[in-house]
Amino acid sequence: MNEFADPPHRVRVRYCETDRMAVAHHGSYVAWFEEARTEWMRRRGRTYRQIEDDGNLLQVVEFVCRYHKPVDYDDVVAIRLRVAEAGKAAVTLEYEARRETDGAVCATGSTKLACVGRDGKLRRLPPELAG
């Protein structure tokens, strides 16, 4: 398995992402992981848009998140990711979200992305996503 990518992607918990207790809502992690994934692709030399313009659509076919510690309004969360598994037409990425103030792991998770064409048929994964 590959090491987690550096540098981590940082997000600051916005008020609109919290519940009545000022704790980040569990659904916020979906967007945060996507944002980290998009920036990870950009650092690898291709943007999500460029990949899609080439006719490669990346469909999320699985999302998993385990919540370990809460993060609150205005906390900064550092999200690192790594390629856990890459096949011919799909890649599984793992995420680790840490609270920057104390380094506590707040959440871990994964997404599995399948590469399909505009016709919906599986396509070979672009090489920059393979690992």
Image (spheres, rainbow, N blue to C red):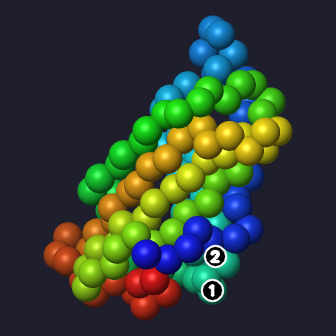
Q: Quadrant of the N terminus?
A: bottom left
Q: Is residue 46 above or below residue 60?
A: below
Q: Could you say whether the residue bearing mark 1 is in a helix, strand or loop?
A: loop
The answer to whether one can see residue 112 in this image is yes
- Residue 25 on image: x %, y %: 55, 25
Residue beneath disc 2: 42
Q: Residue at x 80, y 30 (%)?
A: 74
Q: Could you say whether the residue bearing mark 2 is in a helix, strand or loop?
A: helix
**Which residue extends farthest left?**
121
Q: Residues within 10 Å of mark 1 (few under 14, many from 20)?
A: few
Amino acid at circle 1: Gly
**Distance of label 1 from label 2 (alpha carbons):** 5 Å
Q: Is residue 24 above or below residue 47?
A: above
For the residue pair 10 and 120, the one nearer the viewer reads as 10
Numbered mark located on residue 24 in the image = none
For the residue pair 102 and 94, the one nearer the viewer reads as 102
Q: Is residue 127 left or right of 25 when viewed as pictured?
A: left
Q: Quadrant of the C terminus?
A: bottom left
Using the rendered view, name the quadrant where residue 107 is placed.
top right
- Residue 27 on image: x %, y %: 48, 32
The answer to whether one can see residue 55 in this image is no
- Residue 35 on image: x %, y %: 60, 55
Q: Is residue 122 left or right of 57 when viewed as pictured?
A: left
Q: Is residue 113 left or right of 82 when viewed as pictured?
A: left
Count how many numbered circles sit on residues in the image. 2
Residue beneath disc 1: 45
Q: Are marks 1 and 2 in contact (CB under 8 Å)?
A: yes
- Residue 60 on image: x %, y %: 34, 57
Amino acid at circle 2: Arg
Q: Is residue 116 above or below residue 131?
A: above
